[in-house]
Amino acid sequence: MSPWLLGSLGVVAAGGVALAVRDGGSTGSDSASYTVSGSVTAGPVIGGHGLSVTAYDKDGNPLGTAKVASDGAYSMSITNGYSGVVLVRVSDADDGADYFDEASAEGEDLTVDLRALSVSKGANLTVHITPLTELAVIKAGTFFCNKIILLR
């Protein structure tokens, strides 16, 4: 992928996140539930891994958590009707191999953050998490420490 295209993706992501953060987030009064699902791809996921995905609201509060299946897919229910910016983060609970590194042809442990940002409108949401979505989170100028904060 060209640096120009990657930079353009970051600018688009930053603009979308900036608007979403400015608009804030809310918890629906009717507490409608919806699903956040997608896939994790750093390379093909290896069965028996310790990966899970957690979704957070704009204030850093967990919305839901799901185990990652052996094919890399995940799905979780959000039951409080939250709408607004959602940060989805992969975490690893063990030191075992989590994915197949295609460059080295070996199983590797996931030792870095992989995150993605999206905006929920209180309806089903698909969010795929890859090394490129982590770059978009970084390029958007955000970091996560109990809140999603835009760096200026």
Image (cartoon, rainbow, N blue to C red):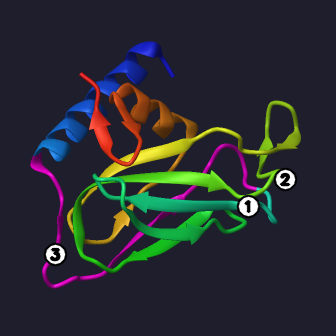
Q: Residue at x 36, y 60 (%)?
A: 61
Residue range highlighted in magenta: 23-45
Q: Earlier in the sequence, mark 2 or mark 3?
A: 3
Quadrant of the image occupied by residue 16: top left
Image x and y of residue 43, in percent: 70, 44
Find numbered disc 1 in the image and state the secondary structure of the residue it sits on. Answer: loop
Residue 50 bears which disc, if any? Answer: 1
Marks 3 and 1: in contact by CB < 8 Å? no
For the residues labelled 2 and 3, the Cα–Cα distance comes to 39 Å
Q: Which sits in the foreground, 31 or 144?
A: 144
Query: In this figure, which residue is indicated by the disc labeled 3?
Result: 28
Quadrant of the image occupied by residue 104: top right
Which residue type carries mark 1?
Answer: Gly
Q: Is residue 91 left or right of residue 103?
A: left
Dot 1 alpha-carbon crowd within 10 angstroms: few under 14, some 14 to 19, many 20 or more? some
Which residue type carries mark 3?
Answer: Gly
